[in-house]
Image (tube, rainbow, N blue to C red):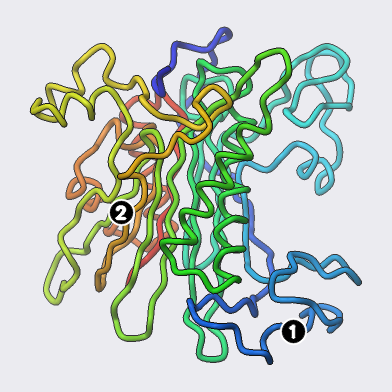
């Protein structure tokens, strides 16, 4: 099992992009309480911001008008059905048909529909970008996030999930898409129950494991992926709490902005890879030598029906507290393969405003070769 897969059966290339299509997150403000305390009776029910109908704090949609409730959220790349609903059906380049399945394959001839090379979203508290790269025929990464705005004395909270589909499995994009959506939903549900950030990030991980197992086919097809998530909460005191979870080799980093007045903890990787290279490091091999091993990217743990009932480990969940300024970065190995060191990544991620920084991280990976899909999520800590 490897997160650095063999070339696609039908290799594809592209030139470096002059511009990038952007997906706007046109979502509604939240009233969802998330503190790990009993939910006040007055907050157990609230009103839909669109039609004012009563809704519960754990309701995702208003039953009266269909408005999404609770958090501003987005998931990328957009599913085919969602894209068609917004922009109309896409004509197949091969046969001219307009009927595609959920994975983007033409029902008439089987041709995979084309997608934009890059999707982006700006939620204010987090900036997302995912890119096909220069060699792969499709983007098998996925990223999702939700922002719960501060309201009524309750601190704001951000949930982020990145997943890298394992190309040696079938339909890896189905696994990564299921993982990020279920992971965000699982975290939000636990937060709405008043769970701590650690409990919530673990609940999201368990939801993602179940969701990816659920996309397996009876014929033995088992889409699989990696997973990394984080929940960030600021308490208005200048201190931020970060709970993180991961399986596989997608990573989370804390990246401090250097310079006068920087008080946050030093830049560092927050997660531990589940890879053969990490196993070598655990037994005393230095990082650089371990990454040169032919099996360096082979995964020891992953999400999928073939990964066992519970692929988690004792080290898959952790917490981190810091002050700003800096950023939390979640990314797939399409980025960190080219610059794994936290301080080296910080030089890019903290040098510009957050959306330009997310784009520059992707552009750096493209300039470095772009051999894999590239996904980043940048959350400012200020």
Q: Is residue 286 visible?
A: yes
Task: Compare residues 38 and 326 and report the one nearer the observer.
Answer: 38
Q: Residue at x 86, y 35 (%)?
A: 89
Mark 1 crowd level (few <14, some 14–19, many ≥20, 10 Å Cα) = some
Residue 250: x, y in percent? 38, 38
- Is residue 64 left or right of 307 when viewed as pictured? right
Quickly name the residue at label 1. Answer: 46
Mark 2 vs mark 1, CA separation in Å? 38 Å
- Is residue 119 left or right of 321 when viewed as pictured? right
Q: Is residue 148 above or below residue 329?
A: below
Task: Compare residues 228 and 96 and report the one nearer the observer.
Answer: 228
- Is residue 96 left or right of 220 when viewed as pictured? right
* Helix, strand or loop for disc 1: strand
As drawn, the label of residue 235 is none
Residue 7: x, y in percent? 47, 11
- Is residue 195 left or right of 198 when viewed as pictured? right
Q: Quadrant of residue 279?
A: top left
Q: Is residue 18 visible?
A: no
Quickly name the residue at label 2. Answer: 349
């Amino acid at each position: 099992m490897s997160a650095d897969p063999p070339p696609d059966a039908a290799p594809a290339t592209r030139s470096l992009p002059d511009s990038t299509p952007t997906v706007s997150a046109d979502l509604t403000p939240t009233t969802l309480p998330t503190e790990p305390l009993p939910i006040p009776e007055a907050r157990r029910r609230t009103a839909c911001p669109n039609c004012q109908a009563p809704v519960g704090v754990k309701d995702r949609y208003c039953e009266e008008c269909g408005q999404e409730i609770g958090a501003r959220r987005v998931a990328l790349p957009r599913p085919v059905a969602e894209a068609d609903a917004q922009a109309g059906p896409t004509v197949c380049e091969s046969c001219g048909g307009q009927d595609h399945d959920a994975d983007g394959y033409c029902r008439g001839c089987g041709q995979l529909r084309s997608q934009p090379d890059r999707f982006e979203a700006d939620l204010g508290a987090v900036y997302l970008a995912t890119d096909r790269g220069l060699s792969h025929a499709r983007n098998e990464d996925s990223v999702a996030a939700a922002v719960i705005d501060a309201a009524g004395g309750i601190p704001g909270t951000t949930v982020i999930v990145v997943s890298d589909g394992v190309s040696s499995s079938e339909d890896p994009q189905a696994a990564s898409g299921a993982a990020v959506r279920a992971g965000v939903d699982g975290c939000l549900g636990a937060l709405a129950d008043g769970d701590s950030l650690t409990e919530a990030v673990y609940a999201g991980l368990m939801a993602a494991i179940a969701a990816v197992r659920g996309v397996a086919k009876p014929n033995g097809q088992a889409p699989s992926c990696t997973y990394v998530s984080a929940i960030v909460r600021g308490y208005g005191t200048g201190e931020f709490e970060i709970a993180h979870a991961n399986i596989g080799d997608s990573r989370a980093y804390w990246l401090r902005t250097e310079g006068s007045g920087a008080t946050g903890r030093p830049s560092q990787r927050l997660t531990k890879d589940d890879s053969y290279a990490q196993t070598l490091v655990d037994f005393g091999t230095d990082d650089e030598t371990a990454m040169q091993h032919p099996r360096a990217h082979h995964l020891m743990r992953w999400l999928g029906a073939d990964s066992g009932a519970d692929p988690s480990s004792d080290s898959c969940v952790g917490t981190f507290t810091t002050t700003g300024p800096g950023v939390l970065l979640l990314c797939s190995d399409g980025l960190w393969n080219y610059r794994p060191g936290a301080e080296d990544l910080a030089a890019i991620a903290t040098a510009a405003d957050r959306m330009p920084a997310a784009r520059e991280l992707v552009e750096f990976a493209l300039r470095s070769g772009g051999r894999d899909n590239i996904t980043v999520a940048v959350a400012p800590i200020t």
